Image (cartoon, grey):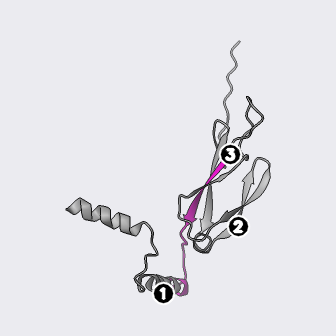
Amino acid sequence: LYIFVEVQKDKLFEREEENLFCEIPISITTAILGEKVVIPTLDGKVELKIPKGTQSGKIFRIKDKGVKSIRSSSNGDLYCRVHVETPINLTSEQERLIRELDESLTGDNKNHRPKEKTWMDSIKDFFE
């Protein structure tokens, strides 16, 4: 007698041993200004504080919200990767406001884009 067990993929979580991984979409304003977001876990919902200036791809660890270990009494962790969603179908007024924001960010000679300098250095190095 052979028994084959196949675990069906979950729509929200991916599992790696006792740890769980998920992707959380957040708005651009949440990424810029920071906010608390509600995250589903196996035990229910928890709040995750998204700090100001969070970049897309940032991973947050929520301790002990993974899967219970078979070998010990500990739980794995839940790792949440944020994905900043870019707004679509903007009105002309919304586009105008975003252009104003962009102009205000580039006009004061401050670096509001943390990866821009590194990227530009890579391009410069490529052509040298």
Q: Quadrant of the N terminus?
A: top right
Decide which of tag 2 and tag 3 comes sooner along the chain. 2
Position of residue 20 measured from the top left corner of the image (x, y, whole percent) = 66, 44
Q: Distance between the residues labelled 2 and 3?
A: 19 Å
- Numbered disc in front, either 1 or 2: 2
Taking the spot 57% from the left edge, 60% from the top edge, the residue there is 83
Can you tell which quarter of the image residue 6 is in?
Answer: top right
Give the distance between the C-alpha atoms of the residues marked 1 and 2, in whole angstroms.
Answer: 27 Å
Magenta residue check for 81: yes
**Which disc, if any, is residue 36?**
2
Residue 32 placed where, x, y %? 57, 73
Q: Is mark 3 on a helix, strand or loop?
A: loop
Q: Label 1 belongs to which residue? A: 100
Name which of mark 1 and mark 2 comes first in the sequence. 2
Please report the bounds of the magenta region as a residue range: 78-95
Q: Residues within 10 Å of mark 1 (few under 14, many from 20)?
A: few
Residue at (76, 57) in percent of width and height:
46
- Residue shown at 36%/64% (left/top)? 119
Looking at the image, tell me whether mark 3 or mark 1 is earlier in sequence order.
3
Are the residues tagged 2 and 3 within 8 Å (C-beta)? no
Amino acid carrying mark 2 in the image: Lys
Residue nearer the viewer, 56 or 95: 56
Residue at the spot of label 3 = 77
Q: Which amino acid does label 1 sit on?
A: Glu
- 36 or 11: nearer the viewer: 36
Mark 3: amino acid:
Asp
* Image position, residue 76 (x, y; %): 69, 41
**Where is residue 91 drawn, in percent x and y?**
55, 83
Q: In this view, does 35 lie above or below 39?
A: below
